[in-house]
Protein backbone atom coordinates (compact mmCIF):
# COMPACT_ATOMS: atom_id res chain seq x y z
CA UNK A 1 0.00 0.00 0.00
CA UNK A 2 1.32 3.45 -0.97
CA UNK A 3 1.91 5.68 2.06
CA UNK A 4 0.47 9.12 1.32
CA UNK A 5 0.34 10.30 4.92
CA UNK A 6 3.46 12.46 4.69
CA UNK A 7 2.36 14.33 1.56
CA UNK A 8 1.21 17.90 2.14
CA UNK A 9 -1.45 17.44 -0.54
CA UNK A 10 -2.99 14.61 1.50
CA UNK A 11 -3.03 16.29 4.90
CA UNK A 12 -6.08 17.83 6.52
CA UNK A 13 -6.45 21.59 6.50
CA UNK A 14 -7.10 22.92 10.03
CA UNK A 15 -8.89 25.96 8.62
CA UNK A 16 -11.64 23.85 7.05
CA UNK A 17 -12.34 21.13 9.58
CA UNK A 18 -16.01 22.25 9.64
CA UNK A 19 -16.31 22.50 5.86
CA UNK A 20 -19.51 20.43 5.86
CA UNK A 21 -21.17 23.00 8.13
CA UNK A 22 -20.26 26.10 6.11
CA UNK A 23 -22.70 28.25 4.18
CA UNK A 24 -22.20 28.92 0.48
CA UNK A 25 -20.60 32.27 1.27
CA UNK A 26 -18.29 30.72 3.87
CA UNK A 27 -17.20 28.00 1.42
CA UNK A 28 -16.39 30.59 -1.25
CA UNK A 29 -14.50 32.73 1.28
CA UNK A 30 -12.50 29.75 2.53
CA UNK A 31 -11.57 28.69 -1.00
CA UNK A 32 -10.56 32.22 -1.95
CA UNK A 33 -8.43 32.53 1.15
CA UNK A 34 -6.67 29.24 0.47
CA UNK A 35 -6.13 30.12 -3.19
CA UNK A 36 -4.17 33.17 -2.07
CA UNK A 37 -1.69 30.74 -0.52
CA UNK A 38 -1.15 29.31 -4.00
CA UNK A 39 -0.03 32.69 -5.33
CA UNK A 40 2.37 33.04 -2.40
CA UNK A 41 3.74 29.54 -2.91
CA UNK A 42 4.43 30.19 -6.58
CA UNK A 43 6.24 33.42 -5.77
CA UNK A 44 8.72 31.31 -3.82
CA UNK A 45 9.63 29.16 -6.84
CA UNK A 46 10.01 31.95 -9.42
CA UNK A 47 13.74 31.20 -9.98
CA UNK A 48 12.90 27.62 -10.94
CA UNK A 49 10.05 28.75 -13.18
CA UNK A 50 12.37 31.23 -14.89
CA UNK A 51 14.81 28.42 -15.65
CA UNK A 52 11.95 26.33 -17.02
CA UNK A 53 10.92 29.20 -19.29
CA UNK A 54 14.47 29.55 -20.63
CA UNK A 55 14.89 25.79 -21.11
CA UNK A 56 11.59 25.63 -22.98
CA UNK A 57 12.46 28.63 -25.14
CA UNK A 58 15.81 27.02 -25.99
CA UNK A 59 14.06 23.79 -26.99
CA UNK A 60 11.74 25.65 -29.37
CA UNK A 61 14.61 27.70 -30.84
CA UNK A 62 16.46 24.44 -31.57
CA UNK A 63 13.50 22.87 -33.35
CA UNK A 64 12.27 20.83 -30.39
CA UNK A 65 8.91 20.59 -28.67
CA UNK A 66 7.50 21.27 -25.25
CA UNK A 67 5.96 17.99 -24.08
CA UNK A 68 3.72 17.91 -21.01
CA UNK A 69 2.97 14.55 -19.48
CA UNK A 70 0.77 13.74 -16.50
CA UNK A 71 -2.16 11.76 -15.14
CA UNK A 72 -5.64 12.82 -14.07
CA UNK A 73 -6.02 16.53 -13.33
CA UNK A 74 -2.31 17.13 -13.95
CA UNK A 75 -2.49 15.49 -17.37
CA UNK A 76 -5.58 17.51 -18.29
CA UNK A 77 -3.84 20.75 -17.34
CA UNK A 78 -0.93 19.91 -19.65
CA UNK A 79 -3.30 19.06 -22.50
CA UNK A 80 -5.24 22.27 -21.97
CA UNK A 81 -2.12 24.40 -22.19
CA UNK A 82 -0.93 22.51 -25.27
CA UNK A 83 -4.14 22.96 -27.26
CA UNK A 84 -4.34 26.67 -26.43
CA UNK A 85 -0.89 27.50 -27.79
CA UNK A 86 -1.64 27.19 -31.55
CA UNK A 87 -4.47 29.75 -31.72
CA UNK A 88 -2.68 32.11 -29.33
CA UNK A 89 0.81 31.98 -30.79
CA UNK A 90 0.30 30.67 -34.31
CA UNK A 91 2.39 27.53 -33.74
CA UNK A 92 1.53 24.07 -35.05
CA UNK A 93 -0.21 21.51 -32.86
CA UNK A 94 3.07 19.58 -32.81
CA UNK A 95 4.97 22.40 -31.09
CA UNK A 96 3.44 21.99 -27.62
CA UNK A 97 2.19 18.48 -26.91
CA UNK A 98 0.12 17.14 -24.03
CA UNK A 99 0.15 13.48 -23.01
CA UNK A 100 -2.15 11.98 -20.38
CA UNK A 101 -2.10 8.54 -18.77
CA UNK A 102 -4.79 6.42 -20.39
CA UNK A 103 -4.73 8.34 -23.67
CA UNK A 104 -6.75 11.30 -24.92
CA UNK A 105 -10.05 9.73 -23.84
CA UNK A 106 -8.84 10.13 -20.25
CA UNK A 107 -9.27 13.88 -20.69
CA UNK A 108 -13.05 13.56 -20.38
CA UNK A 109 -13.37 10.25 -18.54
CA UNK A 110 -11.01 9.01 -15.83
CA UNK A 111 -9.03 5.88 -16.69
CA UNK A 112 -8.40 4.36 -13.30
CA UNK A 113 -5.02 2.73 -12.75
CA UNK A 114 -3.44 4.19 -15.89
CA UNK A 115 -1.03 6.28 -13.82
CA UNK A 116 0.42 3.28 -11.99
CA UNK A 117 2.65 2.02 -14.80
CA UNK A 118 5.98 3.76 -15.47
CA UNK A 119 6.51 1.83 -18.69
CA UNK A 120 3.40 3.46 -20.17
CA UNK A 121 4.93 6.89 -19.69
CA UNK A 122 7.95 5.73 -21.66
CA UNK A 123 5.76 4.17 -24.35
CA UNK A 124 3.71 7.33 -24.80
CA UNK A 125 6.89 9.33 -25.41
CA UNK A 126 8.10 6.68 -27.86
CA UNK A 127 4.83 6.96 -29.80
CA UNK A 128 5.47 10.64 -30.54
CA UNK A 129 9.16 10.04 -31.31
CA UNK A 130 10.47 12.07 -28.40
CA UNK A 131 14.07 13.08 -29.03
CA UNK A 132 16.93 15.04 -27.49
CA UNK A 133 15.70 18.38 -28.91
CA UNK A 134 12.48 18.16 -26.89
CA UNK A 135 11.87 19.27 -23.34
CA UNK A 136 9.66 16.99 -21.23
CA UNK A 137 7.67 18.51 -18.38
CA UNK A 138 6.17 16.02 -15.95
CA UNK A 139 3.12 17.20 -14.01
CA UNK A 140 2.16 15.38 -10.81
CA UNK A 141 0.45 17.07 -7.89
CA UNK A 142 1.39 14.25 -5.53
CA UNK A 143 4.92 14.12 -6.90
CA UNK A 144 4.94 10.33 -6.97
CA UNK A 145 3.02 9.30 -10.12
CA UNK A 146 4.78 6.25 -11.64
CA UNK A 147 3.58 7.08 -15.18
CA UNK A 148 5.28 10.48 -15.00
CA UNK A 149 8.43 9.16 -13.34
CA UNK A 150 8.81 6.54 -16.08
CA UNK A 151 8.44 9.20 -18.75
CA UNK A 152 10.99 11.54 -17.15
CA UNK A 153 13.54 8.78 -16.66
CA UNK A 154 13.18 7.69 -20.27
CA UNK A 155 13.41 11.27 -21.55
CA UNK A 156 16.69 11.74 -19.71
CA UNK A 157 18.18 8.69 -21.43
CA UNK A 158 17.41 10.43 -24.74
CA UNK A 159 19.26 13.56 -23.68
CA UNK A 160 16.12 15.66 -23.21
CA UNK A 161 16.00 18.36 -20.62
CA UNK A 162 13.38 17.42 -18.06
CA UNK A 163 11.27 19.40 -15.60
CA UNK A 164 9.00 18.17 -12.83
CA UNK A 165 6.07 20.19 -11.48
CA UNK A 166 4.78 18.82 -8.18
CA UNK A 167 2.99 20.19 -5.12
CA UNK A 168 5.02 18.33 -2.50
CA UNK A 169 8.62 19.15 -1.62
CA UNK A 170 11.40 16.62 -2.30
CA UNK A 171 9.14 14.67 -4.63
CA UNK A 172 9.92 11.48 -6.52
CA UNK A 173 9.18 13.18 -9.84
CA UNK A 174 11.52 15.99 -8.83
CA UNK A 175 14.29 13.48 -8.24
CA UNK A 176 13.68 12.05 -11.73
CA UNK A 177 14.06 15.44 -13.48
CA UNK A 178 16.82 17.94 -14.17
CA UNK A 179 14.75 20.71 -12.60
CA UNK A 180 12.05 20.45 -9.93
CA UNK A 181 9.35 23.11 -9.43
CA UNK A 182 7.66 22.32 -6.12
CA UNK A 183 5.42 25.05 -4.69
CA UNK A 184 4.12 24.35 -1.19
CA UNK A 185 0.45 25.33 -1.43
CA UNK A 186 -0.49 23.76 1.89
CA UNK A 187 -3.27 21.19 2.40
CA UNK A 188 -6.37 21.37 0.22
CA UNK A 189 -9.60 22.69 1.74
CA UNK A 190 -11.12 19.32 0.78
CA UNK A 191 -8.57 16.77 1.93
CA UNK A 192 -6.68 15.18 -0.95
CA UNK A 193 -8.67 16.93 -3.71
CA UNK A 194 -5.69 18.06 -5.77
CA UNK A 195 -7.88 19.44 -8.53
CA UNK A 196 -8.22 22.50 -6.24
CA UNK A 197 -5.12 24.44 -5.10
CA UNK A 198 -2.70 21.96 -6.64
CA UNK A 199 -4.50 22.13 -9.97
CA UNK A 200 -4.60 25.92 -9.85
CA UNK A 201 -0.91 26.00 -9.01
CA UNK A 202 0.05 23.74 -11.91
CA UNK A 203 -2.11 25.72 -14.35
CA UNK A 204 -0.44 28.96 -13.27
CA UNK A 205 3.00 27.41 -13.73
CA UNK A 206 2.38 25.98 -17.21
CA UNK A 207 0.83 29.33 -18.23
CA UNK A 208 4.09 30.99 -17.24
CA UNK A 209 6.30 28.41 -18.95
CA UNK A 210 4.55 28.31 -22.32
CA UNK A 211 3.84 32.04 -22.50
CA UNK A 212 7.38 32.91 -21.44
CA UNK A 213 8.87 30.51 -23.97
CA UNK A 214 6.76 31.98 -26.76
CA UNK A 215 7.74 35.54 -25.80
CA UNK A 216 11.41 34.55 -25.98
CA UNK A 217 10.74 33.07 -29.42
CA UNK A 218 9.40 36.32 -30.88
CA UNK A 219 5.70 35.53 -30.68
CA UNK A 220 4.97 38.81 -28.88
CA UNK A 221 5.57 42.48 -29.72
CA UNK A 222 5.24 44.80 -26.74
CA UNK A 223 2.44 42.88 -24.97
CA UNK A 224 0.52 42.01 -28.12
CA UNK A 225 -0.18 38.56 -29.61
CA UNK A 226 1.31 39.21 -33.02
CA UNK A 227 1.10 35.61 -34.26
CA UNK A 228 -2.56 35.11 -33.35
CA UNK A 229 -4.43 32.83 -35.76
CA UNK A 230 -7.53 34.27 -37.41
CA UNK A 231 -9.88 31.31 -37.58
CA UNK A 232 -13.11 33.21 -36.97
CA UNK A 233 -14.62 36.70 -37.22
CA UNK A 234 -13.72 37.59 -33.64
CA UNK A 235 -10.07 36.75 -34.20
CA UNK A 236 -9.95 38.72 -37.45
CA UNK A 237 -11.20 41.71 -35.49
CA UNK A 238 -8.64 41.03 -32.77
CA UNK A 239 -5.85 40.87 -35.35
CA UNK A 240 -6.84 44.25 -36.74
CA UNK A 241 -7.09 45.68 -33.23
CA UNK A 242 -3.55 44.45 -32.55
CA UNK A 243 -2.28 46.11 -35.73
CA UNK A 244 -3.99 49.35 -34.73
CA UNK A 245 -2.57 49.22 -31.19
CA UNK A 246 0.96 48.55 -32.44
CA UNK A 247 0.97 51.22 -35.15
CA UNK A 248 -1.63 53.82 -34.21
CA UNK A 249 -3.25 53.44 -37.64
CA UNK A 250 -6.93 53.51 -38.58
CA UNK A 251 -9.01 50.35 -38.90
CA UNK A 252 -9.16 50.84 -42.65
CA UNK A 253 -5.35 50.89 -42.87
CA UNK A 254 -5.12 47.91 -40.52
CA UNK A 255 -7.51 45.90 -42.68
CA UNK A 256 -5.62 46.80 -45.84
CA UNK A 257 -2.30 45.73 -44.32
CA UNK A 258 -3.77 42.55 -42.87
CA UNK A 259 -5.13 41.52 -46.27
CA UNK A 260 -1.96 42.52 -48.13
CA UNK A 261 0.16 40.52 -45.66
CA UNK A 262 -1.93 37.39 -46.10
CA UNK A 263 -3.23 37.67 -42.57
CA UNK A 264 0.21 37.89 -40.98
CA UNK A 265 -0.09 40.42 -38.16
CA UNK A 266 3.67 40.79 -37.70
CA UNK A 267 4.14 41.52 -41.38
CA UNK A 268 1.30 44.04 -41.37
CA UNK A 269 2.82 45.90 -38.41
CA UNK A 270 6.24 46.12 -40.03
CA UNK A 271 4.67 47.19 -43.33
CA UNK A 272 2.93 50.12 -41.69
CA UNK A 273 5.70 51.25 -39.34
CA UNK A 274 8.45 51.02 -41.98
CA UNK A 275 6.21 52.07 -44.88
CA UNK A 276 7.18 49.08 -46.99
CA UNK A 277 5.40 46.31 -48.90
CA UNK A 278 4.66 42.80 -47.63
CA UNK A 279 7.70 41.22 -49.28
CA UNK A 280 10.08 43.75 -47.76
CA UNK A 281 8.45 43.37 -44.35
CA UNK A 282 8.75 39.60 -44.46
CA UNK A 283 12.40 39.87 -45.45
CA UNK A 284 13.12 42.14 -42.51
CA UNK A 285 11.30 39.80 -40.14
CA UNK A 286 13.24 36.80 -41.44
CA UNK A 287 16.51 38.65 -40.88
CA UNK A 288 15.35 39.46 -37.35
CA UNK A 289 14.47 35.87 -36.55
CA UNK A 290 10.76 36.70 -36.42
CA UNK A 291 11.09 39.39 -33.74
CA UNK A 292 9.09 42.50 -34.66
CA UNK A 293 11.11 44.87 -32.47
CA UNK A 294 14.39 43.70 -33.99
CA UNK A 295 12.97 44.10 -37.50
CA UNK A 296 11.97 47.67 -36.72
CA UNK A 297 15.35 48.54 -35.21
CA UNK A 298 17.52 47.17 -38.02
Image (cartoon, helix red, strand yellow):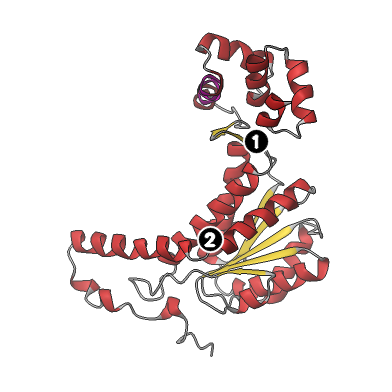
Give the tally of numbered discs: 2
Q: Pinpoint residue 116: horizontal percent, then vertical percent.
A: 61, 77
> Which sits earlier in the primary sequence, circle 2 or circle 1?
2
Relative depth, front residue between 167 and 27: 167
Which residue lies at the image location 77% right of the left edge and 51% below the top edge?
64
Residue 251 lies, in percent from the top left, at 51, 13
At x 69% / y 42%, what residue is drawn? 217
Q: Which residue is mark 2?
A: 46
In this rendering, position of residue 235 left or right of residue 187 = right
Residue 71 found in image quarter: bottom right
Q: Which residues are magenta?
A: 238-245
Spatial CA distance of label 2 from label 1 is 27 Å
Residue at image location 76% in from the left, 67% down from the top: 155
Classified by dominant secondary structure, the portion drawn in magenta counts as helix
Q: Does 255 appear above or below 20?
A: above
Q: Rate crowding at label 1 as few (under 14), some (14 to 19) or many (20 or more) other CA atoms within 10 Å.
A: some
* Res. 99 in view: no
Estimate the x, y position of residue 262 in percent, counting from the top left. Answer: 69, 19
Q: Is residue 39 above or below residue 251?
A: below
Left or right side of 261 for 29 = left
Image-based side of 67 in relation to 236, left or right = right
Identify the residue at image location x=26%, y=65%. Answer: 30
Q: Quadrant of the C terminus?
A: top right
Residue 294 can be seen, yes or no = yes
- Mark closer to the observer (2, 1): 2
Residue bearing the label numbered 1:
90
212, above or below 294, in the image: below
Could you say whether the residue bearing mark 2 is in a helix, strand or loop? helix
| Residue 246, horizontal then vertical, whole percent | 55, 23
Q: Secondary structure at mark 1?
A: loop
Amino acid sequence: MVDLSKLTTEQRNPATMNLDQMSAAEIATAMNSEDSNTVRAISEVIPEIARAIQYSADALLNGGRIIYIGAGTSGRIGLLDAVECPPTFGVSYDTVVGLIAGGENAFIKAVEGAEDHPEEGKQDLEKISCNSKDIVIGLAASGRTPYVIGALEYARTLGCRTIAVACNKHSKVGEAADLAIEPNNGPEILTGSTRLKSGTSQKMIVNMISTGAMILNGKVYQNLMVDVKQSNEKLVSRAENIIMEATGCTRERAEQARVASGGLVKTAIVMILLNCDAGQAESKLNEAGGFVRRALEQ
